Image (cartoon, helix red, strand yellow):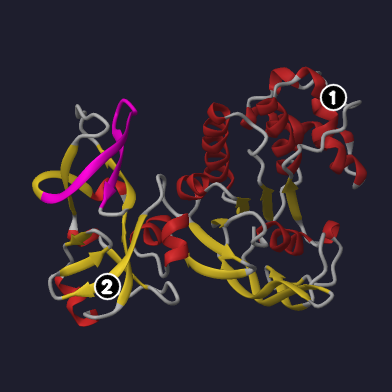
Amino acid sequence: MAEVTLSRVRKNYGALGIIHDVTLEIEDGEFVVLVGPSGCGKSTLLRMIAGLETITAGDVRIGRRVVNELDPKDRDIAMVFQNYALYPHMTVATNMGFSLEHRGIKKAAIEERVNWAADILGLSHLLDRYPRQLSGGQRQRVAMGRAIVRDPQVFLFDEPLSNLDAKLRVVMRGEIRSLHQKLKTTTIYVTHDQVEAMTMADKIVVLNGGRVEQIGAPLDLYDRPVNQFVAGFIGSPAMNFLTGTITSGGFAAPGILLPLPEAAEEFRGRNAVYGIRPEHFALDEQGVPAEIILVEPMGSETHVTVKLGDTTVTCVFRERVSLSPGAMIRVRPELATVHLFAADDGQRLN
């Protein structure tokens, strides 16, 4: 195992900058998730760590070594891809042991490592099968097994669950996290799915346009996003945003006046964005009026889309409620959870 350090890493394709001065420290044994929208540079950054993309500037260190000029095979990493990349003519056992065979390791040692990895991943009864005889989840386990047998210093995962159905993604999410807890190998995981990031990571790196927006523990990013981009990207359903002005009487948005925490007084007169998560609304007869647009019962909670003034927002109520579209209700924002962002650059105010 080893720590991974990126120091002012940049990637250009000609005059086009893709990655802009990314600095990141990943501790030995840490599970770090790179997350962001499509095209933000997260897979490019992972491929630079793996050695599959050249580095325009900066340094990548794995352990104490600067690996900028090293071939992927010499970096002591193992990568799991989105499309499994299994050899169709090889059995599960041969697929898992192929890289060891290629390195000249003795057959008995390969068999021992393959059996060990298969036992961890629940593949022992599938070792004689071929990829075409496996489900998507089983194929992904084989791809993980192929990485495990190498006993690398670092695991790299590039959106490994994106080809699986929703239910299987949840199962595999837990299996990958459980695998990390058993092996404690430094892991860097790329996804565009912020739910994966929140549930799996020790630390999340939010990327946007090739730049790091925020780095932190999942709940730190959830509770204290540094800007509107992070606030809107982390959390499901997404945070609600209303644009308006901070006044002495509250937050004046089109068609509505919302309450503000006392700390907002210092920003009086500023144009701002009022952010509140759906679950931080409560039904309250003393709250602000809202017209119901849509009601979605989810079993354990109810998602309600409402009109607050001229803005459509989502509320999540944990209790079961009997509500109908077109009806009027009153909702109260929990003031301790209100986020305020500057209207011009989206940076956090409170």
Return the mark for residue 245. 2
Q: Which residue is mark 1?
A: 91
Whether residue 139 is situated above or below residue 151 in the rendered picture: above
Q: Quadrant of residue 123?
A: top right
Q: Is residue 316 depicted above or below 257 in this figure?
A: above
Left or right of residue 191: residue 264: left
Secondary-structure class at tag 1: loop
Residue 309 visible to an observer of this rendering? yes
User: Which residue range is magenta in the image?
Assistant: 287-308
- 222 displayed left or right of 229: left
Please identify the quadrant where the N terminus is shown: bottom right
Q: Which mark is residue 8?
A: none
Q: Amino acid at mark 2?
A: Thr
Identify the secondary structure beneath mark 2.
strand
Residue type at mark 1 is Thr
Residue found farthest to the left:
286
Where residue 94 sits: x, y (%)?
A: 85, 30
